[in-house]
Structure formats: structure tokens, C-alpha cells
Image: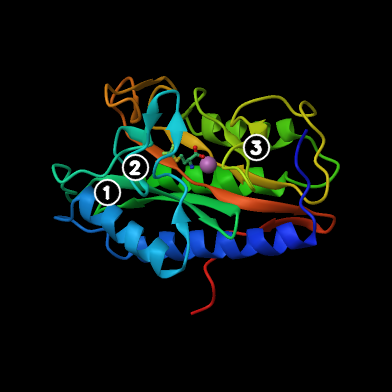
Amino acid sequence: MIPIKDATGIARMREACAVAAFVLHELKKHVRPGVTTYDLDQLAKDLIASRGARSACFGYQIDERRFPAYSCLSVNEEVVHGIGSLKRVLRDGDIISLDIVVEHQGYIGDNAFTVPVGAVSPAIQKLLAVSREALALGIAQARVGNRIGDISHAIQVHCEKNGFGVVRDLVGHGVGVDMHEEPQIPNFGRKGTGAKIRPGMTLAIEPMVNLGTYRTKCLSDGWTIVTTDAAPSAHFEHTVLTREEGPEILTVPPAA
Ligand code: MF3
Ligand code: CO
């Protein structure tokens, strides 16, 4: 069953998503050569607290493990779920994926993007542009009457047309009271398949796109997902509300 949010749920989702977007955009301002991913994670912690929210990442449990950081910070070949570390110093030419998930008044907002550190190569610039476009194309398919596979297909086609690998091992998801609700939203798939999109769904659409192979593996820390060929990876994510009028991106920062 895919949860449908009522007016109250939608209002709360709007607020949680605005907080998540605020934190993400503030964090981005501090990405520069010389900063450690530990510093960025501490900043994320403080920014989330400043808005009266809670990190949905910290303590998030899979089997016996609990995620030890407040944000997911994934550098270069790290795809998602990177853990901030004093040993990871950002350098000119790196990319970093910032993924912020917050809980506010019982509802969760989830968003992410990948940003360059200083000047990056033309190949990486293209990876970022195509991945951002793929998210926009996926969101455009999140229309009432379409199916989840329409989102998946639009993302996959755009990435593969440009020669990039679309991650298979992780997928987008419904989001609301829980960080991961139904449906799963793969970034690959066939048009006209999967659940029908109805009004009042809140969907985290999140292409993870690799410069090389789509294959990934998990590091021995139990969390960090990396590309098997060590080529860089990008991640763009919004939480989207499906309305009769069309998809609405909820993870937009409040006007300053
Ligand atoms: N945006 C990620 C997701 O949807 C956030 C994971 S939080 C973590 O899975 F706790 F697992 F790190
Ligand atoms: Co997500």
C-alpha cells in the first residue's frame, strides 16, 4: 500500500522538506578545498538542530548497524551513505554528494545533490549535468495516471544515452512518516509498469549515476557504497508531491 497524504500530512511534509532543503543549500556554501567531511557533517547537525528538526540518518538502523553520522557525504567514487571523517579532506577537482534527510513534526524530507569542489574535469561536469537533467526528467513523469516505471524509464534512458551507468543496487522511495515507504522507485525500468501514480503521494526520486560501470559494492564500514571501478558517481534527489495539477517539488529552500 502506498501511503496517500491528507491535507495535514501534506502541510507537514512541506515543512519538513523546506528544512531539508535549507540545510542542504547552507551546507553547500561550505564545500571547498581543505574542509573535512567531518566538519561538514557537524555543520549539518547544527543546521538541522537550528530548525528544530532531527537527522533521520543518525541512528538509522539496518540489521544490527546504526548510521553514525547526521548526513550522508559521499566523495568521488562513493555513491551514497558516506560517513563524515576527519581524514577525508576535500581537494580541488573532487565532487561530493550531500544527502540530507530530516524529521520534523513526525514527517520526513529527503534531498541530495552533488557539487564540484573547486574546478572539475569536463567529463565530471557532464556527469553532474546529465544526472541533474535525469532527475528533472524523472520528476516530469511523476504525473497522476502515469506509473512508477515511467519515472524509472525516463531517468535510465537519459543517463545511458550519455554513456553513464545507472546504479541498480539502490533505488528511490516513497517518504513521509517513515524514511522509506512504498513504492520503490528504481532508476531503471520499463514504461507503463509498476504502481499507478495517484494524488497525494510523496516520492523521493533519486538517480545515482556513475561515470563508468553501474556496479557498486559496500565498504567494510557497512555503509559506504562505492563504484566497483572507482570511477566517480553523482546523486540528485528531491521529495516530490503528486498533485492532480502535476508534480510539485517539496524540497525547495524557503525564500531568504
Ligand atoms: N537518502 C538516503 C536514502 O534514501 C538516506 C539514507 S540515510 C542513512 O536512503 F541513514 F541510511 F544513511
Ligand atoms: Co532518499
**Residue picked out by circle 2:** 124
Expressed as whole percent of the image width and height from the top left, the position of residue 153 reads 67, 31
Query: Dot 2, crowdedness within 10 Å: few (<14), some or many (≥20)?
Result: many
Are the two marked residues, 1 and 2, in contact with CB atoms closer than 8 angstroms? yes
Above-or-below relation of 237 to 28: above
Q: CA separation, marks 1 and 2? A: 6 Å
Marked residue nearer the N-terminal end (3 or 2): 2
User: Element under label 1?
Assistant: loop
Q: How is the image coloured?
A: rainbow
Q: Residue 248: give its label.
A: none
Left or right? Give the position of 96 relative to 190: left
Please state which of the two labelled residues, at mark 3 or mark 2, is closer to the viewer. Answer: 3
Above-or-below relation of 148 to 37: above
Expressed as whole percent of the image width and height from the top left, the position of residue 89 reads 15, 47
Left or right? Give the position of 4 relative to 121: right
Q: Give the residue drawn at x 49%, y 59%.
A: 20
**Residue picked out by circle 1:** 120
Q: Give the residue drawn at x 86%, y 42%.
A: 145
The three-letter code of the residue at mark 2 reads Ile
Expressed as whole percent of the image width and height from the top left, the position of residue 129 reads 46, 48
The three-letter code of the residue at mark 3 reads Glu
User: Element under label 3?
Assistant: strand
User: Element under label 2?
Assistant: helix
Above-or-below relation of 141 to 152: below
Q: Quadrant of residue 190?
A: top right
Left or right? Give the position of 244 relative to 51: right
Judge: label 1 CB < 8 Å from ligand 1: no
Q: Give the residue drawn at x 51%, y 51%.
A: 111
The three-letter code of the residue at mark 1 reads Val
Query: Dot 1, crowdedness within 10 Å: few (<14), some or many (≥20)?
Result: some
Question: Dividing the image into 4 quarters, which one contains the N terminus?
Answer: top right
Expressed as whole percent of the image width and height from the top left, the position of residue 103 reads 53, 54
